[in-house]
Image (cartoon, rainbow, N blue to C red):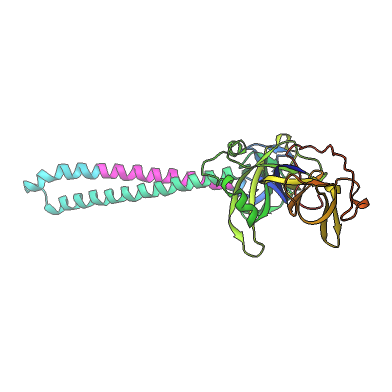
């Protein structure tokens, strides 16, 4: 019998999604007049994807600028009137004290000064409001150029030139696909096996740093064409809770995606090392006989007599089978010709050439 450490691998169905998925929506209402990107192409953050008719917003900006100029003119006029009022107060104060003019005239001068001071404050507030209107109008005019928020692959346009759009209209979607995220669910038991190796993503972490983090769990992706994706991925983090209905927890991983071959919505299979079966007992698969759900192995006892024993089988490991119970290390088992022997029969055994093999295998019966 072969005895060695056997890696236990998990296999799960996974779906791919963009590392960032951004819905591109306008921030103003208007008629769409131009599309500047090619659907399915790579776009950069800040690129103008769509243009909305700017004329109403240019007119609103011109009007706001006119109102600002008018408010500035009114402020200048009020400042001139305040200056005159202050001159009158300064001139008439000694005259009134000398009784050269009536006190009522000085009082009128002082009242006029205060009125102009209040008017200036009002005009200054009007100027701030007009400046805010100009800034808003400039923003709205700028929003007629609908820009990309991220670097990524731009999808098919969801609306056509000439349509009336508003802030609730989704024009297209952009996905950052390098790296690309992968989602799959594992059982609670499998999660506990991986828990110490799954690190929660910390704020400020960079995605590509996480792909190379030493404490991340490496994962392998098999695509729909049954080919193994050449890039190795990493588990980034686990979801916050276990699904109480299914008893599974969602795991999020990531793969580098040079060339943008992988796309959101694809399905595949994730494979990851979940545990190591220490000093496992292995026998060739052909040495195990299944009879009505029972598994049996022919053991060669001292004196070369055959004993048929029941065993509990575990994971299949390449061309071998892990034996969980029923056998002990050092026993000799019949690897070929089991159908020709009977319990208690004396045989002349020949040694097998079975040797320990590289620790890479599959998990589960029938794989």
Give yes or no for residue 59 being in the magenta stretch.
Answer: yes
**135 or 323, nearer to the observer:** 323
Image quarter where the N terminus lies is top right
* Nearer to the camera, 122 or 341: 341
Q: Residue furthest left?
A: 98
Percent position of residue 366, x then y = 82, 52
Q: Position of residue 347 (x, y in %)?
A: 89, 47
The reply to whether residue 158 is in sight is no
Q: Quick check: can you spot residue 244? A: yes
Is 154 in front, or is 115? 154
Which residue is found at the position 17% from the left and 45% from the top? 89
Residue 30: horizontal and vertical position, in percent?
A: 64, 51
Main SS class of the magenta portion in the image = helix
- Could you tell me how many numbered marks the image carries? 0
Instruction: Give the residues in magenta.
Output: 57-83
Within the image, what quadrant is residue 68 found in?
A: top left
**Can you tell which quarter of the image residue 154 is in?**
top right
Q: Locate residue 196 relative to residue 39 in the image: left or right.
A: left
Based on the picture, tell me whether residue 178 belongs to the magenta stretch. no
Where residue 184 sits: x, y (%)?
68, 51
Q: Looking at this rendering, what residue extends furthest in the bottom direction?
A: 245
Q: Quadrant of residue 294?
A: bottom right
Direction right: furthest residue = 340
Q: Residue at x 60, y 41 (%)?
A: 216
192 over 94 or under it: above or below: below
- Which residue is at a point 75% across and 54% down the rendered structure image? 326
Q: Is residue 117 left or right of residue 107?
A: right
């Amino acid at each position: 019998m072969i005895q060695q450490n056997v890696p236990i691998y998990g296999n799960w169905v996974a779906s791919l999604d963009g590392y960032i998925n951004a819905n591109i929506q306008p921030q103003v209402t208007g008629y769409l007049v131009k599309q500047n990107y090619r659907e399915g192409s790579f776009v950069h953050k800040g690129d103008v994807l769509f243009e909305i008719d700017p004329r109403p917003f240019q007119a609103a900006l011109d009007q706001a600028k006119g109102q600002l100029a008018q408010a500035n003119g009114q402020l200048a006029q009020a400042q001139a009137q305040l200056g005159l009022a202050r001159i009158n107060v300064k001139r008439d104060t000694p005259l009134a004290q000398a009784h050269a003019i009536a006190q009522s005239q000085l009082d009128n001068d002082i009242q006029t000064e205060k009125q102009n001071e209040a008017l200036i404050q009002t005009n200054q507030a009007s100027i701030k409001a007009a400046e805010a209107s100009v800034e808003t109008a400039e923003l709205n005019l700028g929003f007629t150029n609908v820009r990309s928020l991220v670097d990524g692959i731009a999808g098919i346009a969801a609306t056509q030139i000439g349509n009336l759009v508003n802030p609730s209209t989704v024009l297209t979607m952009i996905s950052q696909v390098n790296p690309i995220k992968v989602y799959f669910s594992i059982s609670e038991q499998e999660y506990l096996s991986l828990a110490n190796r799954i690190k929660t993503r910390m704020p400020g972490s960079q995605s590509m740093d996480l792909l190379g983090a030493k404490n991340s769990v490496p994962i392998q992706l098999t695509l729909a064409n049954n080919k193994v994706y050449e890039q190795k991925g990493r588990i980034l983090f686990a979801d916050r809770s276990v699904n109480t209905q299914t008893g599974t927890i969602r795991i999020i991983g990531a793969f580098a995606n040079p060339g943008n071959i992988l796309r959101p919505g694809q399905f595949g299979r994730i494979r990851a090392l979940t545990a190591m079966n220490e000093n496992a007992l292995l026998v060739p698969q052909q040495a195990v006989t299944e009879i009505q759900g029972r598994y049996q192995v022919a053991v060669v006892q001292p004196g070369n007599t055959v004993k048929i024993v029941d065993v509990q089988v575990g994971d299949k490991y390449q061309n071998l089978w892990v034996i969980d119970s029923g056998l002990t290390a050092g026993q000799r088992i019949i690897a070929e010709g089991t159908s020709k022997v009977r319990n208690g029969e004396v045989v002349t055994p020949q040694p097998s050439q079975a040797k320990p093999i590289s620790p890479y295998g599959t998990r589960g019966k029938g794989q």
